[in-house]
Image (spheres, rainbow, N blue to C red):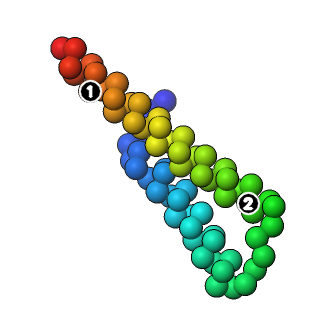
Amino acid sequence: MKMFSKSWLIPYLSMIVGVGFVVYSFVTGNLITDSHVQMLDYLLYLTLGSGAVGMANKGFKRYTEFKK
């Protein structure tokens, strides 16, 4: 399977969805339930995880270029 060519999209998309949800709930006055908090936690983990994978991939590419 080919890697996703726009690797910056995954962290930013999940961050935008999370921030947008919080702003929407404050503007409309809706309560944030426990299930919403769990969903926002998942988006945070997704953002951090995809960032860590991207950094590891970039570091490995630089390492292989350095070893040549």
Q: Secondary structure at mark 1?
A: helix
- Residue 19, picture quadrant: bottom right
Report whether 23 appears left or right of 54: right
Report whether 29 appears left or right of 15: right
Callout 2: 10 Å neighbours few (<14), some, many (20+)? few
Q: Amino acid at mark 2?
A: Val
Q: Is residue 66 above or below residue 6?
A: above
Q: What is the C-alpha distance between the residues marked 2 and 1?
A: 38 Å
Report whether 27 appears left or right of 49: right
Where does residue 61 sit, x and y in percent of width and height?
A: 30, 26
Q: Amino acid at mark 1?
A: Arg
Where does residue 60 sit, x and y in percent of width and height?
A: 34, 24
Where does residue 41 sit, x and y in percent of width and height?
A: 67, 53
Q: Residue at x 27, y 19 (%)?
A: 64
Q: Is residue 4 above or below residue 68?
A: below
Q: Residue at x 66, y 80 (%)?
A: 26
Residue lying at the far right of the rendered structure? 34
Residue lying at the far top of the rendered structure? 68
- Residue 58, picture quadrant: top left
Q: Is residue 48 above or below residue 22?
A: above
Residue identified by numbered label 2: 37
Residue nearer the viewer, 13 or 31: 31
Residue identified by numbered label 1: 62
Q: Secondary structure at mark 2?
A: helix
Q: Residue at x 18, y 14 (%)?
A: 68
